[in-house]
Image: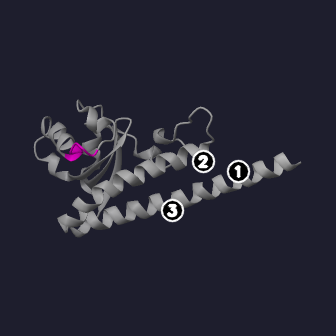
Amino acid sequence: MESLTTMRIAAPLDCDLCTQGSNDCYALNHIQSEIQSVEHGLHDAVLLAIPLGKSQFDLAVEQNTVSRIREHFTDISHLRLLSSDPLFAAELGRSFPETAFGALTQMRRQYNLAASSIYISNDPRRIRWFETENKRIESLLEVYQQQLVDLAEMSICIKQQ
């Protein structure tokens, strides 16, 4: 059984709840419907869709369908969880570590909201995908939290001088 791969897409769906990152809406249905409308059969290749806000979604997809899914959505996977990630865009008055930490905290929240349905599915591939992605997010949260601590300590040292 082939493992799932992660894609980050930008998709300006017609559903305001989805594009704002709300879990009050079932984003997977919207993503699958969008794909189904242009290519029958491909919608089953997307097994999970986690809304992240700013019209962005993390998808768990079948590895052999990534190139076909790219034909239907703007693929921004190459920016995912890097300093150039659009979710980490600088915010006025905040350092990059603060912005990244805030975005990752929100991302973790969205993943946690999806957790129960993933575990209820009892699908080992979905669960493995979810746990791998969750560990990646947790690891980055630790990195940025340490950077925030270091910045605070540096700020205290500068003020004392």
Farthest-out residue, right: 161
Decide which of 102, 67 is in the foreground and name it.
Answer: 102
Q: Residue at x 67, y 56 (%)?
A: 149
Could you tell whether 111 is left or right of 39 in the image? Answer: right
Answer with left or right where residue 4 lies relative to residue 153.
Answer: left
Amino acid, disc 2: Pro
Residue placed farthest to the left in the image?
A: 40
Q: Are marks 2 and 1 in contact (CB under 8 Å)?
A: yes
At label 1, the amino acid type is Leu
Q: x, y percentage for residue 50?
A: 30, 49
Amino acid type, label 3 = Ser
Crowding around mark 1 (Cα neighbors within 10 Å: few <14, some 14 to 19, many 20+) is some
> Does residue 130 show up magenta in the picture?
no
Residue 68 spot, x, y in % from top left: 24, 44
Upstream in the sequence, badge 2 or badge 3? 2
**Is label 3 in a helix, a strand or a loop?**
helix
Where residue 139 is drawn, which disc sits there?
3
> Which secondary structure class fits the magenta region best?
loop
Badge 1 element: helix
Q: What residue range appears in magenta?
A: 23-28
